[in-house]
Amino acid sequence: MYILGISSFYHDSAAALVKDGKIIAAAQEERFTRKKHDDNFPKNAAAFCLKAAGITIEQVDYVAFYEKPLIKFERLLRTYFAYAPFGLNSFLKAMPQWIRKKLWMPELIMEELKGFNGKIIYPEHHESHAAAAFYPSPFQEAAFLTVDGVGEWTTTSFGIGKDHQIQIDYEIHFPHSLGLLYSAFTYYTGFKVNSGEYKVMGLAPYGEPKYVDLIYKHLLDLKEDGSFKLNMEYFNYAAGLTMTNDKFHRLFGGPPRKPESLLTQREMDLAKSVQVVTEEIMLRMAKHVRKVTGQKNLCLAGGVALNCVANGKLLKEKIFDEIWIQPAAGDAGSALGAAMFVWHQYLGNNRNVEKDDTQFASYLGTEYSDQEIEQFLNSKNIAFQKCTKEEMISQVVDFLAEEKVVGWFQGKMEFGPRALGARSIIGDARSSKMQSVMNLKIKYRESFRPFAPSVLREKMSEYFDVDYDSKYMLLVADVKEDRRIPMTEQQEKLFGIEKLNIPRSDVPAITHVDYSARIQTVHKDVHGTYYELIRAFYEKTGCPVIVNTSFNVRGEPIVCSPEDAYRCFMRTEMDYLILGNYILSKTDQKQTEDNKEWMKEFELD
């Protein structure tokens, strides 16, 4: 039996295919359209999933859409009526799209998936999140906690998953939302909502929590059990076109920062403050969930579960014995959750629980054979060197040791927002200049942004103050004390962005200004060639850690195809590109008469 899960029409549309309860394929639509956070119906992602399974849409038994559109529409109408006449502009902007498209979901699905003649099932939004959190997890029984912006009405939920059943026991409803609180500060500090929240998290260590008391006093009524209410006098998102209002702006001393303008200490302090509040709420929620459910393990999903700093604090507190976080925790992962919900909850099929998990390291996307890669390279007259895998790894190790920046394209593309060693840009973590080079010359992004380490799992505790699997790069931990470089008395007096270029450890490229790192553990039996590369680098240099950042430039999705990878390679100052077992050197990429026209699209704007 085949079940196709779909999420779309808000942000990060995606499709996932499940066969008899086993995950076959999953991908975000943005990877194919090259439109970041694409919210359109994921027809390309769905087509990929079907192709990966070798089936046609006629063979799909169920389509699972990740939420109930009619209930969401009811929430919008009731909210607009509650705030009327305020919010008229937002109402006029939203309604035409709903009336033309979103209210007619069955017809739309049948139109987009021509030939489908099965049944369409609509789990609730947070049921899809809970299913994505629990069903692929390694637990037969566990509590789950889902926290995001908003689904239909729910913004937070928790309950218990047992065997093949999930049950939501408690919910917090719109407009009271931890995700939307964080997004409000994302908007106010000048970043884009639903995509810039991780920038706020990365900016927080440069600031001081000077606004925490102000948030608790004016914006948030937080209870001991983690439940809360927001003071909507300060927010505009319920029915307006912005997240915050003039009262919010007066409270924090001025209008929102204009996007791309200079970051000041105020933005850094705001980021730190909302991060501290978020961590406190998540800790209180987790303690309450443990107390009420009695469960020893916890599964997390929803956009807030991508806050890896909060996740790291949660792990460190040891509230639960073990934690498993859905790697595609946001709405993209709900496509997978919806499909698994139908198989287990709706159809009542049992689960096969694995020792690790059943998400296959989230390597669920597109894959290209050496033959397909070579065909592409030859078709565009691109210079390359063909190697065995062993030769390729040996050369890449040398490149990294020489402080070169390498585009790494191997195997199946990752599902979710993190690059996990399939579509990555990699570098030497020991290099004191690597963070600056990658940010400014490769990623073309803000200089304050930290980079993540990929570390051999067996060497993790030698470098980081944690010994827990983090193969999905969803936990932040501190660099060990004995690897840190003490700051001088003069350096200790620095504030904000002045802290940026001071080496903090013997792996400075991945050590943030607060001595933390967002860790990916790399496993021999899971990560294949990526593990072999880092192991070879360790054997040559004595260092089992490399820099791993997503293979894309600012404003673009992670690369999907060899052509996407080559385009990104040519538009940046990357030194080498590895496509499977093929090595491309930047110095060898010269225009010829055969490919001159095609190469024009790689010229930087």
Image (spheres, grey):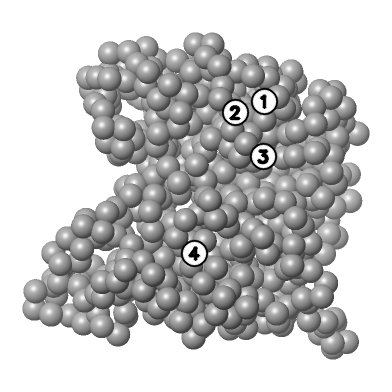
Using the image, determine if residue 483 lies above or below residue 61.
below
The disc placed on residue 594 is none
Separation of residues labelled 2 and 4 (CA atoms): 28 Å
Task: Work out whether 76 lies above or below 431.
Answer: above
Q: Quadrant of the C terminus?
A: bottom left
Q: Which residue is mark 3?
A: 324
Nearer to us in this view, 260 or 42: 42
Point out residue 88 in the picture as x, y percentages from the top left corner: 53, 31
Mark 3, Cα crowd under 10 Å, few <14 / some 14-19 / many 20+, is many
The answer to which of marks 1 and 3 sits earlier in the sequence is 1
Helix or strand or loop: what does disc 4 sit on? helix
Local secondary structure at mark 2 = loop
Label 4 with label 1: CB-CB less than 8 Å = no
CA separation, marks 4 and 3?
Answer: 25 Å
The image shows residue 321 at horizontal and vertical percentages of 80, 39
Question: At label 2, which amino acid type do we have?
Answer: Val
